Image (tube, grey):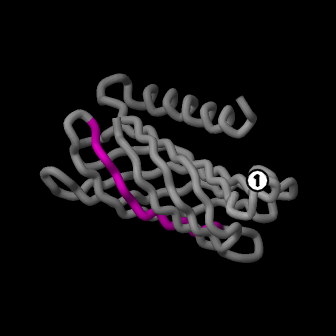
């Protein structure tokens, strides 16, 4: 297993431990996994995966921890850029029966993995809008998750569009 998938797996497992400990085993922990397409003013167009662990605080509000891994590989694998985007968010689910809109607000980081000086890295401010659709035993989610990347001398934008399953 290469270094990048191991790093993502480690982040997701650590996130699961924090959320499970915070919930006190009284609320069901939900796991989400999906894919995304990200357009970034820093790195261009990339494809990636995303994982999220959340715990409901009440019927409308959840706390989530997750991370995405995006490969900007459209120029070929030799010139590929890999970016990790960990995030923490509060998710507010709006009323709905079979499907419900939601808003997620939080923060995180934009971490290019092959940027030794970390010139392109920075904290992010995230505001996502999405919709969750109930299936038989799982849920389907799709969202637009814009991120402002706060760097030392400028502000950049990343716009992932995500689709996935919540278990």
Relative to 130, 64 lies left or right: right
- Quick check: 78 left or right of 98? right
Front residue (pair 136, 56): 136
Q: Residue at x 26, y 59 (%)?
A: 101
| Residue at horizontal 82 percent and vertical 54 percent from the top | 78
The furthest residue to the left: 97
* Screen quadrant of the N terminus: top right
x and y percentages locating residue 3 in the rendered image: 74, 35
Residue holding disc 1: 77
From the top left corner, tell me how far across and down residue 157 is, in percent: 60, 72
Q: How many marks?
A: 1
Question: Which image quarter: residue 26?
Answer: top left
Look at 76% across and 50% down and name the residue there. Answer: 113
| Left or right: residue 33 compared with residue 137 | right
In magenta, the rendered stretch is 138-149
112 up-or-down from 57: above or below: below
The answer to which image quadrant residue 56 occupies is top left
- Give the percent coordinates (x, y) of residue 79: 80, 59
Viewer-side residue, 116 vs 40: 40
Pick out the residue farthest to the bottom.
154
Q: In which quadrant will I find the C terminus?
A: top left
- Residue furthest top in the image: 25
Image location (x, y in percent) of residue 38:
56, 63
Secondary element at image label 1: loop
Q: Residue furthest right?
A: 117
């Amino acid at each position: 297993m290469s270094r990048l998938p191991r790093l993502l797996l480690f982040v997701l497992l650590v996130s699961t431990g924090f959320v499970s400990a915070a919930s006190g085993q009284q609320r069901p922990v939900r796991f989400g996994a999906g894919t995304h397409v990200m357009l970034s003013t820093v790195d261009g167009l990339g494809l990636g995966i995303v994982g999220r662990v959340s715990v409901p605080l009440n019927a409308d509000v959840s706390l989530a921890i997750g991370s995405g891994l995006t490969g900007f590989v459209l120029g070929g694998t030799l010139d590929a850029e890999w970016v990790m985007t960990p995030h923490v968010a509060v998710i507010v689910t709006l009323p709905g029966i079979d499907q419900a809109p939601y808003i997620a607000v939080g923060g995180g980081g934009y971490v290019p993995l092959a940027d030794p000086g970390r010139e392109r890295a920075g904290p992010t401010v995230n505001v996502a809008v999405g919709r969750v659709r109930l299936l038989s035993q799982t849920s389907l989610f799709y969202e637009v998750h814009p991120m402002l990347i706060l760097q030392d001398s400028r502000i950049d934008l990343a716009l992932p569009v995500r689709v996935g399953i919540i278990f």
